[in-house]
Amino acid sequence: MSAEVAVLGAGMHPWGKWGRSFVEYGRTAARAALADAGLGWADVGSIVGADTVRSGYPGYVAGATFARALGWQGARVTSVYAACASGAQAIGAARAQILAGLADVVLVVGADAAPKGFFAPAGGERPDDPDWLRFRVLGATNPAYFALYARRRMAVHGDTLEDFAQVKVKNAAAGRLNPHARYRKAVTADEVAASAVVADPLRLLDICATSDGGAALVLTSMDFARSRGVADPVRIRAVSTVTPTYPRTVLDLPDIATDSTTAADAAAGSFRSSIARAAYEEAGLGPQDLSLAEVYDLSTALELEWYEDIGLCAEGEGAKLVREGATALGGRIPVNTSGGLASFGEAVPAQAIAQVCELTWQLRGTAGERQVPGARAGITANQGLFGHGSAVVAVR
Amino acid sequence: MARTRTPVVSGWFTENAPDGGGFRLLGTRCSACTAVFFPREDAYCRNPRCPGGGELAEVPLSPRGRVWSYTDGRYRPPAPYVSDPAEPWEPYTLLAVELEAEGMVVLGQAAPGTGVADLAVGTEVEVVGGVLNEDAETTWVTWQFKPVGGAA
């Protein structure tokens, strides 16, 4: 298929709280991805940085920052910010450049050093910023939104706290096998239940932490990959970066209200499901073709919603999948084989890239004890604040 | 010296609705396509299929709605949420309320005394005025939701 690009290299800086600059994490991940690809930095024609931010706007210009840290060599440079979708947009920009013939080898890098505790907006009086407003007027933190979705699932679909806990148990079991993960210990349902309530009904172990970390990919044209003797590389077949459709009727952070339906009926399905649908259409495959998926488990309950949004089951049946063990390692369709955000924590501009690193290793068959046998296709799904969709389909 | 009562955000609600209905949230409504916006949108209509040429007029939102979901905040939120770090943290209750006439869900804090144990998805609530915080000169007024007829 002509619209494919090759993933020749994948690399990470381990997640954690390391107390260093995001530049160092990004550089380490970039060097690892280049080494994995068997290429040097001088071979890179373009670098795309997923921007790290402080407070709702890009505080650091990441593409050039990483290029400087690797040593100026004159490469084309791009910097992108799309909140949690920054990494997917960076991959999308890199892919477009390759398919347009602007570059044969593109290095994609995302890294962050996250603050402790709740994410918070910048200081000052900024009532034009919806992210500032939701804190000032409501004190509504990110976990508060996750909890609203969780409570809604309990009321509408009958999900239970035990279902949510099983997601953490499953992801911790996978993260235990991942050397890049921050948390590498098994967790029991009892431990989830015993952890402090942060925002009812969610507990500390239902909610992902904030972390430092970095991830990088080396993407190339298919011709370049073949010229390097890689006949059958992992290929990116779709990158979905869609926006919502008006009226958007599902409450989402940082919004204080949904759109009204007075002028137009809501479209069928959710924004999140439209992200996956666009990726499937572009890739020419569907959920039945997947070997695995990496989804954005900001909370345990949200992971169950993603099962439905990426088409692994019908609406309301997410909890059934986790109860059956279908999404665990060894199950019918493993989800978050990396350990997910539950095991990594959020390093915002890196995470969507890290998801594709996991697909790459799984599709190569080099994921070690986490390996999904015979993996042939995978999807990543994610969502950035303010209406940024993010999904990537990779195949072997 | 008496504090001045000031809305935490100007133009988002009124304590004296023109229809005599007391405290109401205020949105805007596009005269060309009927789209309603809250928080108010005064500059342009955001409905992509709006024929255009309309005006955005202020409109009070429904005084009552039903709980879409709810939660609380067991940990102190960061600034710009205002709280006294010297005082023990008192969790607040947060509601997402579905307004049927507008077809929208609006977030708001619960009125004091309403906890998560008093709520269920579907509970009917009404919007009331309340105090978000006070400083030396100002009582910052906001909107709150409380179950109709008191705590359920």
Image (cartoon, coloured by chain):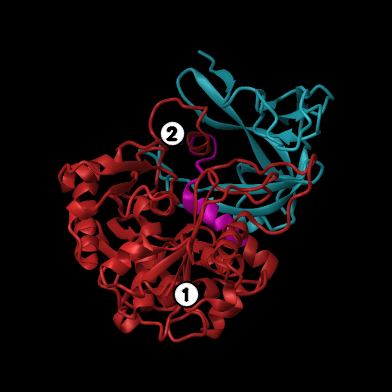
Mark 2 belongs to which subunit? Answer: B
Q: Residue at x 25, y 68 (%)?
A: A228
Which residue in the structure is indicated by mark 2? Answer: B80
Q: Is residue A130 visible?
A: yes
Residue A203's x, y, as percent?
Answer: 46, 63
Query: Farthest top residue?
Result: B1
Chain drawn red in the picture: A
Chain drawn cyan in the picture: B
Q: Residue B47's quadrant in the figure?
A: top right
Q: Is residue A377 left or right of residue B103?
A: left
Given residues B18 and A238, the one toward you in this image is A238
Residue B90's x, y, as percent?
Answer: 48, 46
Structural crowding at the residue carrying mark 2, measured as other residues with C-alpha within 10 Å and reported as few (<14), some (14–19) or many (≥20)? many
Q: Magenta: predominant secondary structure element?
A: helix
Which residue in the structure is indicated by mark 1? Answer: A377
Mark 1 belongs to which subunit? Answer: A
Describe the element under mark 1 as helix, strand or loop.
Answer: strand
Q: Identify whether B143 is placed above or below B10.
A: below
Amino acid of disc 2 = Pro
Q: Are marks 1 and 2 on the same chain?
A: no
Span shown in magenta: A135-151
Residue B123's x, y, as percent?
Answer: 74, 54
Q: Identify whether B115 is placed above or below B22.
A: below
Describe the element under mark 2 as helix, strand or loop.
Answer: loop
